[in-house]
Image (cartoon, coloured by chain):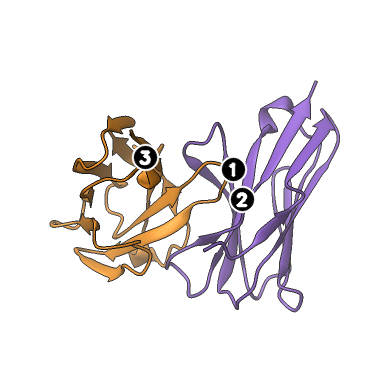
Amino acid sequence: GAGVSQTPSNKVTEKGKYVELRCDPISGHTALYWYRQSLGQGPEFLIYFQGTGAADDSGLPNDRFFAVRPEGSVSTLKIQRTERGDSAVYLCASSDRRAGGETQYFGPGTRLLVL
Amino acid sequence: SQQGEEDPQALSIQEGENATMNCSYKTSINNLQWYRQNSGRGLVHLILIRSNEREKHSGRLRVTLDTSKKSSSLLITASRAADTASYFCATDPRGGNKLTFGTGTQLKVEL
């Protein structure tokens, strides 16, 4: 079946602009995760949804970052007043928590460049 | 923050040789997972080992876990050029929650 998809693949924006990144999880997966990966580093956790609610948002760096998952499927990561330091690859993953699944399946990521 | 560290940071071997990567972590875990990443994009899940397991195999992959030393190793046997990638370990403290990734090992397999 289809894997996790993310759009856009690449996003170039100017400092101070607002961006939205979209994630389509694997159909039926109840859990959805956002990570951010800077060059040469491992991914860092941002936020985790179980269904529609954010179960853990402890990784969001500040209040410019916000994520939603209104119907328990697609999620949008929103970044306000972007800064050059926000440039990174944003990765989304999903897992089937109903089946006790701990394996997270990752999408291809969105490469964000803030000029 | 990064929980673990992979060792070595970079590894270059010849095709057919074995590659061993090590991962150390700091806090207690429910499970530890290994992922592969090509060209800095999506991660591919390789194998998951639970805290009560000591060794696991999947094809050419062998993973060990020593919870007393808070360390894990990934062995790739009979490596191929297609194994060239970055490899990350990730710890899961509670099972199905957020993953904390290490810094990665860049493996290059040369023909």
- Near mark 1 (Cα within 10 A), the count class, few <14, some 14-19 or many ≥20, is many
Q: What residue did someone put label 1 on?
A: B36
- Near mark 3 (Cα within 10 A), the count class, few <14, some 14-19 or many ≥20, is some
Residue B88 is marked as 2
In this picture, is B30 found above or below B76? below
Tell me whether circle 3 and circle 1 mark residues in contact (CB < 8 Å): no
Taking the image as drawn, is residue A74 in sight? no
> Which of the marked residues, 2 or 1, is nearer the chain's N terminus?
1
Figure chain in purple: B
Residue type highlighted by circle 2: Phe
Q: What residue did someone put label 3 on?
A: A3
Which chain is home to disc 2? B
In this picture, is A40 found above or below A34? above
Residue situated furthest top in the rendering: B111
Residue type highlighted by circle 1: Arg
Tell me how far mark 3 sits from mark 1, CA to CA: 16 Å
In this rendering, would A16 be left or right of A102? left
Tell me whether circle 2 and circle 1 mark residues in contact (CB < 8 Å): yes
Residue B66: which quarter of the image? Answer: bottom right
Q: Secondary structure at mark 2?
A: strand
